[in-house]
Every structure is written in C-alpha cells, then in structure tokens.
Amino acid sequence: MAKLWELSGQYRDAAIRLRVGLDAARRRLEQAEGVDRHQISREIALLQQMLTEMRDLRRLAEEYYTRPRNWKYTTVGLVAPRIEQP
C-alpha cells in the first residue's frame, strides 16, 4: 500500500491535466457565442473548483506526516451539538 506522500505525485499529475483542460476551455470560451458560452463558463467554474481541491489534496498528502492538521479533509474535528434537556 502506498504512503500518502507517495500519492502526492499523482495528485500533482492530475492537477496538471486539470490545468490543461481549464486552459482549453478558456480558449473555447473566447470563440463561443450564446448558450455555448454559458455551458463553457459552467465547465470552467467546475474545473477551477476541481483544480483548487486537487492542489489542496496534493499539499495534504505531501505534508501529511510533517504538517500540523487543520482538519479540512477529516472528520476528527467534528463535534456533535449539545442538546439541552427541558
């Protein structure tokens, strides 16, 4: 089984592919008109979000064993709300 820091390279490669797709979508947007522009804009927004998350995951995997946790992608920091009894 791979260690998390070993997976960070795969996350980096995926981020590169997302970046290439994002650049291609932006070029298509420049030439598109009407409904196509709206669809491509939605695709760009989705790709940007995916790229941000992929970069976060790469950083998390790369630094998992050495960096203090901020609980962003874990459930460890979740606390159930206290229910007051009547």
Image (cartoon, grey):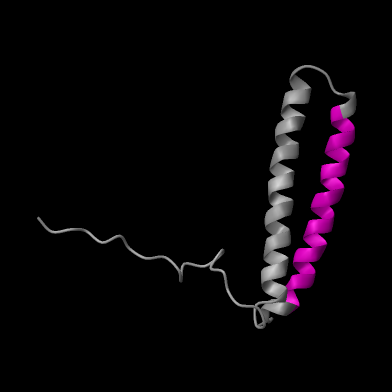
Please determine whether, in this image, residue 7 is positioned above or below residue 13.
Answer: below
Would you identify the image quadrant in which residue 57 lies? bottom right
Q: Residue at x 71, y 53 (%)?
A: 52
Q: Position of residue 85 (x, y in %)?
A: 13, 59
In this image, 48 relative to 26: left or right?
left
The N terminus appears in which quarter of the rendering? bottom right
State whether the magenta stretch is mostly helix, strand or loop: helix
Please determine whether, in this image, residue 52 is positioned above or below residue 28.
Answer: below
In this image, 78 relative to 6: left or right?
left
- Residue in front for this viewpoint, 38 or 85: 85
Q: Position of residue 3 (x, y in %)?
A: 68, 82
Would you identify the image quadrant in which residue 58 lies? bottom right
Q: Is residue 5 magenta?
A: no
- Residue in front for this viewpoint, 30 or 2: 30
Q: Residue at x 52, y 67 (%)?
A: 74
Q: Residue at x 21, y 58 (%)?
A: 83
In this image, 80 relative to 51: left or right?
left
Would you identify the image quadrant in which residue 11 lies? bottom right
Give the magenta range: 6-29
Q: Residue at x 90, y 34 (%)?
A: 27
Q: Residue furthest top?
A: 34
Q: Position of residue 67 (x, y in %)?
A: 65, 78
Q: Position of residue 9 (x, y in %)?
A: 79, 71
Q: Residue furthest left?
A: 86
